[in-house]
Image (cartoon, grey):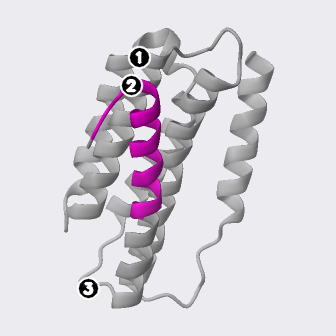
Amino acid sequence: MRILNTAVLLIALLTAGCAKMPPDLTPMAQTAWKQTQVFKAVDLIRDTAISANAIVVPPLLDTKVTGLTVSWHRSTIIIVNQAQAGWQQIVLKSFDELGQQLGQTNYAHVAPYVVLARTLTESIMAMRSATSPSEDVIAIQKATFDRSLAIDDDWLADHVGWNK
């Protein structure tokens, strides 16, 4: 199991490392690009929990723990999508809260992806941008958000009877 977790982490980090920011982006577009990378990393946390619940028999994560993770993911992406500024601190705190909610054993399955998402979030905090994003950037972020939220809603409806 440890080998599988290490392999998955290595693949995730290599994949994230391959996603190079285009060099000609404005400062605001750079921030938006990194914000989209945070979305992807947070999606990895959710996707890992869902896979750990569905693929392995017996499941590595039970449905309740997976539901907590999917609900956390849903809340986190809503915060990132709706907040104009300051969402990074809230998201960083939410990573700690996720660890507390899941407990050490369950958290170990998603911890590598939390480290990735935390690093990306902290890198955004290090950037300063005074301009507003373009309409194209906002549209891309909204589409990413909508797709990700739909996955959460579908999983929660199918597995824990959640209705939005």
Residue at the image point whose x is 39% and y is 25% from the top: 160
User: Which of the pair 53/25 is nearer the observer?
Assistant: 53
Residue 132, numbered circle: 3
How would you classify the magenta stretch by its main secondary structure? helix
As shown in the figure, which amino acid type bears the numbered disc 2? Answer: Val
- The tag earlier along the polypeptide, 2 or 1, is 1
> Percent position (x, y) of residue 88?
28, 53
Front disc: 2 or 1:
2
Distance from the alpha carbon under mark 3 to that under mark 2: 39 Å
Query: Could you tell me residue 124's position as x and y percent?
Result: 38, 62
Mark identifier at residue 160:
2
Residue pointed to by mark 1: 64
Dots 2, 1 in contact, CB < 8 A = yes
Q: Are marks 3 and 2 in contact (CB under 8 Å)?
A: no
Q: Is residue 149 magenta?
A: yes
Q: Is residue 70 left or right of residue 44?
A: left
| Residue at image location 73% in from the left, 35% down from the top | 8
Mark 3 or 1, closer to the camera = 1
Magenta range is: 145-163
Labels 3, 2: front one: 2
